[in-house]
Image (cartoon, rainbow, N blue to C red):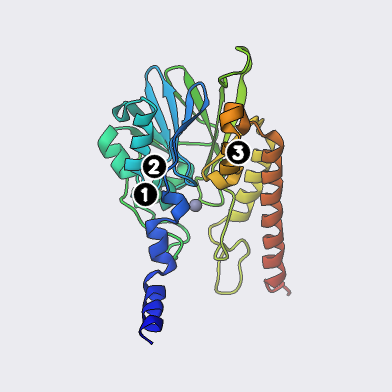
Amino acid sequence: MRTTLYCLLLLLFCSPQSILAEGKPSETTPIAPFRITDNLYYVGSEDLASYLVVTPKGNILINANLASSPPQIRASVEKLGFHWRDTRILLNSQAHSDHMGGAAEVVRETHAKNMVMDGDVSVVETGARTDFLTPSPNILTYVPVHVDRVLHDRDTVTLGDVTLTAHKTAGHTRGCTTWTMRSHLPGEPAGTIRNIVIVGGVGFWSEYHFVATPGHPVSYPDIAQDFQHTFSELRALPCDVFLGAHGGYFDMLTKLKRYPQTGPRVFIDPSGYKQFVTDAQETFRKELSKQEAAAPTTSD
Ligand SMILES: [Zn+2]
């Protein structure tokens, strides 16, 4: 009886909200940082991706992850032999708490300039209080962070000898950003330059409304068009090295098993990238048709 009660209480307190706040184990389990290209390194956890772009003028960090993540990211950066204080620019994949929860701490410690895609600026500056899904158990608030530079679709971010391009791939969040850059992989012929794609996010939950129903508007105006645009944009991007905001997007843990023998070339996966985009678009298409079918038809 006592045990049953305890289990019940445990269930109550381990609500999705508190699990989300802590992060799933895969989001908080550290893994050894590793090199992907000459100037791009992975410094995230088992599933929450964080990337360090290294330049002679300082470094760029993509994703600060959960509020609890910065010490893990910093340890990875230092393990690679780089200095945390050399982080000059903070970029992100999307404004949700699992990618921006740690941003305030990163900025406080490194004084990095925080650059955010236009659609996500207010979400970042309010710590997700203006997310279009709020209030939602999936949307956790975080310490708000000032945005130093507002990015727009296809803006570039340059530091030292590296230029990244910000592709607005909205829908999952209004400013969801897919980053691209061109880089050389260690072990490949000197002249071989690869196209790197870091997918921002393409998913949605049951609470995303693409079609208005009586008393229930769409999640935000043009959300369905944003998703459609995102898929055509992703489809058009040249991709050799497939990366993303979550390791799960590009099957990172499986690929890493081959890393000791093959090196960073394990991440060269243009067909995996195409399949990922195709699958995501199909998932969206099905949900859109389902919502359209459920919506009452307009008649005179
Ligand atoms: Zn998200």
Residue matched to label 1: 101
Please state which amino acid type lies under the numbered disc 3: Lys
User: Element type at marker 1?
Assistant: loop
Residue matched to label 2: 64
Residue matched to label 3: 255
Q: CA distance from mark 1 to mark 2?
A: 7 Å
Q: Of marks 2 and 3, which one's residue comes earlier in the chain?
A: 2
Q: Quadrant of residue 247?
A: top right
Residue 80 can be seen in this image: yes
Please state which amino acid type lies under the numbered disc 1: Gly
**In the rendered view, does 112 fall on the left or right side of 62?**
left
Whether tag 1 and tag 2 are in contact, CB under 8 A, the answer is yes
162 shown above or below 91 = above
Q: Which of the two marks, 3 or 1, is nearer to us in this view?
A: 3
Q: CA distance from mark 3 to mark 1?
A: 27 Å
Whether tag 2 and tag 3 are in contact, CB under 8 A, the answer is no
Seen from the viewer's position, the closer of residues 120 and 277 is 277
Q: CA distance from mark 2 to mark 3?
A: 23 Å
